[in-house]
Image (cartoon, rainbow, N blue to C red):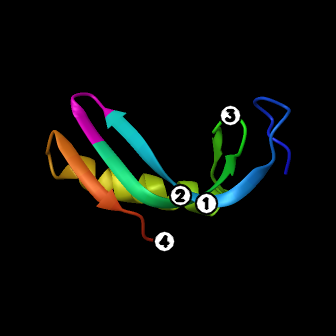
Amino acid sequence: MKCHACGIGLCKLRTASQLLERGVSSVVIRGVPALVCEHCGEVYFAAEVTRSLLHIAEAAFASGKELTLEQYRAA
């Protein structure tokens, strides 16, 4: 897939990290499958991956911790 952000690079299947924030709480999720542009680094997640990210983030936010580090897992 050609990158929609830069219009130059090709996107390849890789893993990425994603930061999600709510109020004063943050969660970093590592090892997320994504398409990543080889030119500009733009990251694209599939819909099912996005649903899993939100599920992981909701559980982390519910813990009340200010910072949480998680490894990606499909929901």
Which secondary structure, mark 4? loop
Could you tell me how far apart the alpha carbons at marks 2 and 4 are, in whole angstroms?
9 Å
Q: Amino acid at mark 1?
A: Arg
Q: Tell which circle, 4 or 1, labels the residue nearer the N-terminal end.
A: 1
| Pointer 4 residue | 74
Q: Nearer the viewer, mark 4 or mark 1?
A: 1
Q: Nearer the viewer, mark 4 or mark 3?
A: 3
Which secondary structure, mark 3? loop
In the image, taking residue 49 as reference, residue 28 lies left or right, namely left
Secondary structure mostly seen in magenta is: strand
Q: Could you tell me residue 52's position as x and y percent?
A: 48, 62
Q: Tell which circle, 4 or 3, labels the residue nearer the N-terminal end.
A: 3
Which secondary structure, mark 2? helix
Q: Nearer the viewer, mark 1 or mark 2?
A: 1
Q: Tell which circle, 2 or 3, labels the residue nearer the N-terminal end.
A: 3
Could you tell me how far apart the alpha carbons at marks 2 and 3 are, in whole angstroms?
25 Å
**Residue 40 image label:** 3
| Pointer 1 residue | 14
Whether 68 is among the magenta residues is no
Which secondary structure, mark 1? strand
In the image, taking residue 40 as reference, residue 24 lies left or right, namely left
Q: Which residues are magenta?
A: 22-26
Q: Amino acid at mark 3?
A: Cys
Could you tell me how far apart the alpha carbons at marks 1 and 2 are, in whole angstroms?
18 Å
Above or below — where is 23 with respect to 36? above
Q: Tell which circle, 1 or 3, labels the residue nearer the N-terminal end.
A: 1
Q: Could you tell me residue 10's position as x and y percent?
A: 81, 47
Q: Could you tell me residue 71's position as x and y percent?
A: 35, 64
**Residue 51 image label:** 2
| Viewer-nearest residue: 66 or 61 | 66
Q: Amino acid at mark 2?
A: Arg
